[in-house]
Image (tube, rainbow, N blue to C red):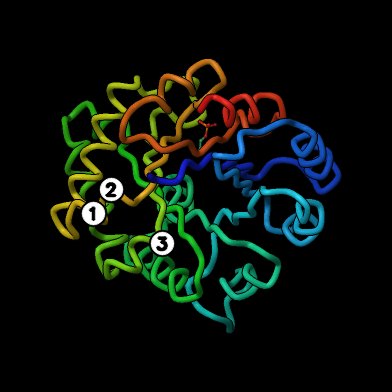
């Protein structure tokens, strides 16, 4: 059976005190232990969060990383640094990084490869814009993003990856893809992987949906056969709504 994963992407929200408060509230909630729960706070929270979660099953993620090991890259954080503070997952290629920070496919594929080489789990994001969907290009856009970011990996390496499908038009807009729209793309992603790596590998990869997931729509989305969890933005900033989403499985 594939892993079920719910990951909270806090983005650039909450200072350290606010973040610790939210994490402590979350630690008091009863959460479904069959679900791998991951939180991706801002970088500077990570090392203190490591202590706070030490007696829990919650895992730490970073929202980004730099692809080089070290060197003159002012303002950047390396994979080794993240590993040293207990990070196990890293979000790669979120649409906000692609759009505002011009992260290109080559840099993203390096990040993915280097994360795998260091034993980390990339959460590789893909998703089409509204105009791409309106033009009927969503299938080809997603296929290309998957190929460019992941197809440099061998089978073993790919099986360490998690994919997040996040239609850009659904992120932070309150507009969610319908379960049918999401399932259709998740199936397309799995087929794209199966064509390259075979069914067995394709069936191992968790594919998360992201884009305005809330407690009132999570159950329906998570019941789709190719949806293995969620990447949650806004609703991860509240312990009750995040735990309700986790418990929607
Ligand atoms: P949202 O964000 O849940 O606020 O739409 C999701 C994401 O960007 O990962």
Where residue 19 appears, as percent x and y from the top left, is 78, 43
Mark number, residue 203? 2
Give the Cα distance between marks 3 and 1: 14 Å
Question: Does residue 224 appear left or right of residue 54 in this picture?
Answer: left
Q: Earlier in the sequence, mark 3 or mark 1?
A: 3
Q: Are marks 2 and 1 in contact (CB under 8 Å)?
A: yes
Q: Give the residue drawn at x 50%, y 54%.
A: 91
Q: Give the residue drawn at x 31%, y 31%.
A: 225
Mark number, residue 160? 3
Image height of 133 relative to 109, above or below? above
Q: Residues within 10 Å of mark 2 (few under 14, many from 20)?
A: some
Q: Give the residue drawn at x 61%, y 39%.
A: 33
Q: Residues within 10 Å of mark 3 (few under 14, many from 20)?
A: some
Where residue 76 appears, as percent x and y from the top left, is 60, 69
Image height of 127 relative to 198, above or below? above
> Residue 162 or 134: which is nearer the viewer?
162
Image height of 204 relative to 176, above or below? below
> Residue 177 or 66: which is nearer the viewer?
177
Between tags 2 and 3, which lies in front? Answer: 2
> Residue 120 or 108: which is nearer the viewer?
120
Q: Give the residue drawn at x 50%, y 78%.
A: 68
Question: Does residue 163 appear left or right of residue 51 in this picture?
Answer: left
Q: Residues within 10 Å of mark 1 (few under 14, many from 20)?
A: few
* Quarter of the image where one finds residue 196: bottom left
From the Cβ of disc 3, is ligand 1 less than 8 Å away?
no
| Image quadrant occupied by the N terminus | top left
Image height of 230 relative to 180, above or below? below
Mark number, residue 200? 1
* Secondary structure beneath label 1: helix
* Secondary structure beneath label 2: loop
* Secondary structure beneath label 3: loop
Mark number, residue 192? none
């Amino acid at each position: 059976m594939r892993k079920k994963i719910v990951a909270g992407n806090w983005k650039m929200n909450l200072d350290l005190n606010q973040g610790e408060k939210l994490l402590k509230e979350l630690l008091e909630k009863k959460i479904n232990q069959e679900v791998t729960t991951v939180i991706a706070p801002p970088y500077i929270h990570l090392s203190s969060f490591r202590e706070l979660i030490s007696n829990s099953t919650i895992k730490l993620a970073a929202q980004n990383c730099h692809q080089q090991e070290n060197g003159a890259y002012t303002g950047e954080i390396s994979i080794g640094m993240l590993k040293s503070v207990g990070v196990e997952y890293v979000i790669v290629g979120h649409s906000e990084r692609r759009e505002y920070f011009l992260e290109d496919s080559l840099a993203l594929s390096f990040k993915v490869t280097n994360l795998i080489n260091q034993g980390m789990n990339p959460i590789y994001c893909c998703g089409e814009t509204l105009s791409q969907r309106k033009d009927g290009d969503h299938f080809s856009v997603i296929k290309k993003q998957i190929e460019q970011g992941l197809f440099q990996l061998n089978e073993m390496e790919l099986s360490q990856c998690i994919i997040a499908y996040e239609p850009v038009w659904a992120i932070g807009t309150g507009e969610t893809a319908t379960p049918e729209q999401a399932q259709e793309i998740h199936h397309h992603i799995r087929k794209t992987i199966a064509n390259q790596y075979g069914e067995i590998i394709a069936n191992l990869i968790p594919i998360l949906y992201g884009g305005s997931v809330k407690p009132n729509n999570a159950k329906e989305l998570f019941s789709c056969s190719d949806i293995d969890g969620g990447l949650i933005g806004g609703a991860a900033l509240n312990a009750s709504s995040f735990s309700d989403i986790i418990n929607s499985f």
